[in-house]
Image (cartoon, grey):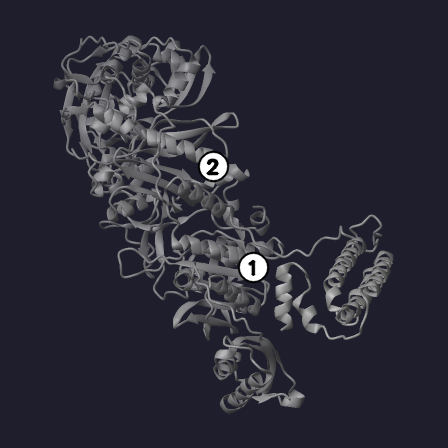
Amino acid sequence: MHQGDALRRCELGLLDFSNDFWCGMSSNTVITLAQFIKELDGFSSDAQAAFDSAQTAEDLENARVEYLGARQGRLKSLQKLLGGIDVEEKPAAGKKLNEVKTNVQQSFEVAVQRVAGGGATAVRDPLFDVTVPGQKFRIGKLHPITQTIEELKDIMGRLGFSSVDGPEVEDEWHNFEALNIPGDHPARDPLENFYVATSERNSERPSSEGPNQRLLRSQTSTVQIRVMERTQPPVRIISLGRVYRPDTADATHYPMFHQMEGLWVDRHVSLAHLKTVLKLFATSYLGESVPIRIRPSFFPFTEPSVEADYFWNGRWVEFGGAGIVDPNVLASVGYDPQIYSGFAFGLGVERLCMIRHKITDIRNLYTNDVRFLRQF
Amino acid sequence: MIVSRNWLSDFVKIQATDEELTQRLTMSGLNHESSEVVDDDLAIDLEVTSNRPDCLGHIGIAREIAALFGYDFAIPTPLIKETGSPIANQFQLRIEAPELCRRFTARLIRNVQVGPSPQWLIARLKTIGVPTINNIVDISNYVMFECGQPLHVFDFDKIHGGQIIVRDPKPEEELVAIDHRVYRLEPGMCVVADAERAIGLGGVMGGADTEVTDRTVNVLIEAAQFNSMAIRNTARKLNLHSAASYRFERPIDAHNIDWASRRCCELILQLAGGELAQNWLDVGSRPDEHPPIELRFDQIQRILGIDIDNEVATQILERLGFKNLQQSHSKISVSRPSWRNDVTREIDLIEEIGRVHGYAHVPDDIAVPMSASHRRTEDRILGKVRNALTAAGFDEAMTASLIPAGWSEAFSPWSNLQPLQTSQGMLGVLEKASHNVGVVKYLRRSLVPSLLEARRINEYKSNSEIELFEIAKVYLESEKELPWEPIKIGLVSQRDFFEVKGVIETLLRHLNWNGELDIMQCDFNLLDINQSCELRINGEILGWLGRVSESGKRTFGIRQHTIVAELDFGLLCNLATLIPLHTDVSLFPAISRDFNFIVQNRIHWSDLRAVVAEAAGSELESIEYKETFRDPQRDGSDKKRLLMSLVLRSKAGTLTGEQADQICREIVVSCQEKLAAELVA
């Protein structure tokens, strides 16, 4: 079997011809080794000259077909001559053929590079203007609030906080009671909240009486309660989403905005954990380590309550409210405050987003002028 | 709360610089807003959180400063001489509405000289930005800003019947207040009345009739304690907010009422002369007694994460006015000072110790245990949807959750139930041109109306390429206690119907769902009757797609061609595959065949496609729709040509030309039989 022979010879390192070559061999013309070598040398110098003189890709392709063409090329003809060489001399002839083939092939590759413009002799085509703009395709942009939220989720995710979601229409228990905001607290004033009722055709006033009224949540802390009600500690979560307060829209207020709320409850979670996590967060968000500080504040659902600031561009920037989860809140979800403790923090997404992108009017975020949206 | 540095110095000797002082106050809970030099004084503006009404007076802030810096602190006892006859013989007090007024006290001074206040008093009020009126009124203000207890001074001779009754309003009752406006009194408001009529709204504003004037000779000094909620509601209802109502909206120090009353009398006697009647009238409840609070020292470390020496902790509490009742190595029992109603529990004591000790001591570099967080499946899918839509050239919009009634009624494909509405509208969220559309108080049941408004705004601004999507919740009334809040994906586009349909189809492929959408007719006024459809998957509604009808465009003020779509994100989540499984690709070559069928106009592409797919069998790799072509002259006006391209491939071996031809023959026969489709030769 020819093929078998070829493989065996290849293994012996005698010949490096492709199987196709051996399979295709059929000529019986008798020729001496010396003649064969002379033919090969002639072929080699002709091919070299032809490749070197080619100026265009077309010239070169013509030369390639003439010398190296798979069907009618001169190399193909020379290969056929191999069949007429004495068996004893065949290995030497084959070796020489291989050398010539490799050299010519290399000359061709060099010529290809040169003609393609890689070489010093390439001539520039003045008609091809590379400064003409490319063909762009339209790609949309994500809203800057979404981009900020995704970044916050990403950072908090790396700090071990999983993102959870909760309803935007809440009941008073989750929005107030369970968060240690009793019925007489000013935050529960009807004018400070969007209470919700099914619209009644003939009644302009939705009924606002009755226990456990529904309202648009005024903070994402509601989700804390929902998660703790259905999970045992440890809890390490963030909730992100829309919240609502009836401020008239102006440059710095909008009746709808976004909050991120973080919560970590476990055994032995202290204010030091809070400060450390806020520091890690600020470092991740700002890309470098910045000083942070916490100072006392007041929120019904945390005790102690603090405001956190980070030092950025030469001043303290308010970061958000935080604190140790009030024992009343833990008790309201059935956690034992003697065993578990935890911290919570909340921050306004719009504020972060606006500082980050130097947006000066919050209403821009919700007008959806595409010239605004495409900037981010 | 603006405080005068000179005034503070009456109670505490401040050695710190202004900078040190305000910095320390900020870091212990009284956030420094700003300072301003006023003549030879400094006005320091401090933010007082709602839990610290004790800091709504100079004494409270001086006490805080003393505790922070370890300064001595003393409150002088007011010196008054009661030279007049006993008040009880001259006047009577009665509380008829104890739920509105806990306690009411009065002192009487006869023969005062009403006139201007002395310079020192005017200067201090000027520093804190309070205008001066006359010595009597100025003194009552001064004492309020000194100790936090609001006072009211009546012209004694204008009180009819020698008595004050604190009661509920009578029907239709009105009061002419000191601003000379008439207020209609409603239930829940605390009326201070004489024998005949209302002479004041307790804690909110006095009446014009009994106010102190230049002609006033005898004055009655009220120091009282009202119900915080009642004061808040009254002040809000009447839009009457004052320094007094602000303080009464918070708990006051009931033990301070007597001091405030005496202090007021002391200053009046000093500055306006007169004779103070013996004793005072004091009706209503006595201050509550509060149980001791116990602090276990080890809880400080547990909550704050730092060790604070027991002695340091004890000292801090004592400096803040807590009385050390009993102390051991492990715990301390204290009674709280009367001005600290906010401190009732161990955790509150821990906060006091922590904030005075300084949160700067709390480390920000402790070892935090690792925890595996996970990204929710919905968040991952949401990310893919956003990627696909931005890649398709859509910008992400964000619009308000509440919309006006007209928009709410214009399109509500997901629910026939009435929209939820809020107790008040969102103000300032509409562009000028949309001001006439009504109150923004309906929770939206679809994103499409908001996106059409965004579209209108952009059109109005002559913006080009208005391609928007939004992913947000809609709010649907449900049988449950809370509404249903499914997430929807809304699209608005200027492209043609099939381009937007293609975006939706591509989105589904991007989520690794390779099925076929079922396309159904739909009927919405908002949408064009022809160019609109319902999209279903396995019988479930994915959403709707359509061109906005002429009437829809009028409703939303849109001029140009617009396509809208809304998809259910929940269903997308159900059909998305986040981790697709590998299948071997066929190693064998494909054969492509084109078809050009003539069919009746009523035959839909989906009909033809289904027949072709069934006939082609398992060797069918793909069917690609090419175009619809009409040539009425050759085919008749009731017919059309549907061109398609098929790719056939076998998994088992190379498909031969003959095999492919056989499949094609079966396709043609099947289409002929089932749809009367003719193959164009």
* Residue B165: % across, % down: 17, 30
Q: Nearer the viewer, residue B349 or B361?
A: B361
Q: What element carries label 1?
A: loop
User: Could you say which quadrant of the image residue B109 lies in?
Assistant: top left
Q: What residue type is labelled 2?
A: Tyr
The circle on residue A285 is: 2
Q: Is B396 on the left-hand or right-hand side of A263?
A: right
**How busy is the neighbourhood of tag 2: few (under 14 within 10 Å), some, or many (20 plus)?**
some
Gap in angstroms between the C-alphas marked 1 and 2 = 30 Å
User: Could you say which quadrant of the image residue B207 lies in?
Assistant: top left
Residue A23, above or below B163: below
The circle on residue B177 is: none
Query: Can you identify the residue that label 1 sits on?
Result: B392
Q: Which amino acid does label 1 sit on?
A: Ala
Q: Which residue is drawn at 61% across and 65% down?
A: A8
Q: Which chain carries label 1?
A: B
Q: Which residue is drawn at 67% across and 60% down?
A: A14
Q: Residue furthest left?
A: B89
> How many numbered circles are shown?
2
Residue A36, above or below B302: below
